[in-house]
Image (cartoon, rainbow, N blue to C red):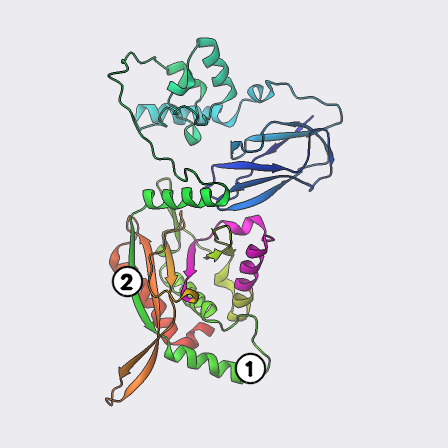
Amino acid sequence: MATEVVMPKLGLTMTEGTVERWIVNEGDKVEQGDPLVEISSEKLSNEVEAPESGYVIKIVAQEGDVIPSRGAIAYIGEEGETIKENAQAEEQPEEESADTEKKADKAVEDTRPSQPAAKDGERIFITPVARKMAEEKGIDIRDVNGTGGNGRITRLDIQRYVPSKTTDTQAAVVHTPEYGAGLEGMRKTIAERMMRSVQSTAQVTNQRKVDVTQLMTFRKEIQEKVNEPLTNGELSINTLLTKAVILALKDMPEMNAWYYDGDYVQVDEIHIGMATALDQGLVVPVIKDAHQMSLSQLGPAIRKVATEARQGTLDGSLYSGSTFSITNLGGYEIEYFTPIINTPEVGILGVGALQKELELDDDGEIVQKLKLPLSLTYDHQIIDGAPAAEFLAKIATYLQDPYRLLI
C-alpha cells in the first residue's frame, strides 16, 4: 500500500508550506531518509525526506503550490503501483473529520466571521469532497465562505451555501490586504509573519540603559583567572546578556509564554530565539533548554546555531519553538529600536550598541560608565507596562551583579 508524503508542520504557527523544488521525479527509486523536495515556510527552507524506501509513484503538489500542513504532496509505493485520482477524497481528509465538522457547526452557531470569498486569481483551499459537490451543484467556489482550518471550504460549507441575490450595484467591494504582495521566497514569508504579528498583538516597547561597567570588569577578571582561553563565546556580551534574560524569565515566568489563537500558555522550559541576519532575510534559530546551560555551554550553543543558520545547515526543528527572543543591532551602532514580537511569543528584547558616558561619582569626580541600551517589546494584551518594566529591571540587576550569572 502506498505511503503518503505530507507537508510537515515545523512550528506552532505553521499552517501551510510552499513547494519550492522537487529533487526527485515520478518513478524514481528512493531510500528512507533521502531528500525528496524543498519546501519553505516560517522564515526558512527545509527538505522533506522519504518516510520509507520505494518508488515515487505520484507527485500531487507542483512547484509553487501552497499546501496545508499535513496535506499530501506525494506518494511512495511499489514499482508500478498507481494512485487513484480520487484517492484523497476517499481517504476523508482531516477537514472532513467529525471533530472538525462539529467545530464548523459551532463557528456558524457563534456567528463568528469566516474566511471571505476569494478574489479572482487567489488560491482557494477546499477539500476534494467539497469541490466535487460544488461541481455537481454548479456552485462557484469563489462565492463560498470556508469555515475549516485556514479558511478551507468543507462539505458542510457547500451544503449550507445559499446563492446571494444582491445585484452588482448592491454588492460591497471588500479590499483585503495581501501581505507580502510582490515579494517572493523568504522575503515574502518574513513580510507575512511580521504583518500577522503586528495585526494580532498589541505591541508596546519599553527602553532603558543598563550600567554594565562592573560586568566588563567581571569579564576581564574571569579571563585572567581561567587557565584556558575562552574563545568560544563563553564570556561575550551576547552570552552574558542571554544568561541574564534566562534568569529574569525564571523569576517572571509570565514572560516565558505563548499566546496563540486565544490560548495563553506559560512554558516551563526556556528556549531562546536568537535573531540572525542572512543575505536573504532574518531567521530566528533556537537554543533549546537554555535554562539548563552554564555560560560555558550557552556561549558555544549561541555561536553554533547562528553559524549553522548562516551556512544553511541548521536542523529544521531549531527554527521554531522559542519561548522568548533576543535581537542585537549593536554591531550596527544602533542605540534603541522597536523589535517586532516573534509570535506566538509575548516578548522580545532588542540590544543596542554599548555606550560610553561620563558621570559624577559620589565624591563629585568625573568617571566613565559603560551603558547598554535595551528595548523590550511586549504584547500588552498579556503583559502590562509595570510588569514589563520590572522584567527589564531584573535583567539589569543580573547584569549589574555579574557573579550571579555563574549560579
In the rendered structure, the answer to whether residue 59 lies left or right of residue 345 reads right
Query: Which of the two residues, 110 or 329, is positioned nearer the viewer here?
Result: 329
391 in the magenta segment? no
Q: How many marks?
A: 2
The x and y percentages for residue 84 are 64, 18
Left or right of residue 78, residue 278 in this image: left
The crowd level at tag 1 (other Cα within 10 Å; few <14, some 14-19, many 20+) is few
Three-letter code, disc 2: Ala
Of 52 and 195, which appears nearest the observer? 195
Residue at label 2? 389
Quadrant of the rendered image containing residue 351: bottom left
Amino acid on which disc 1 is placed: Val
- Quarter holding the N terminus? top right
CA distance separating discs 2 and 1: 36 Å
Residue drawn at point x = 59 percent, y = 18 percent: 86
**Residue 13 vertical placement versus 271 (above, below):** above
- Secondary structure of the residue carrying numbered label 2: helix
Residue matched to label 1: 226
**Which range of residues does the magenta coloring cover?**
301-330
- Which residue appears at 46% of the width and 79% of the height? 219
From the top left corner, tell me how far across and down residue 350 is, in percent.
38, 61
Q: Is residue 101 visible?
A: yes
- x 56%, y 70%: residue: 232
Instruction: Determine whether the residue tagged by mark 1 lies in a helix, strand or loop.
Output: loop
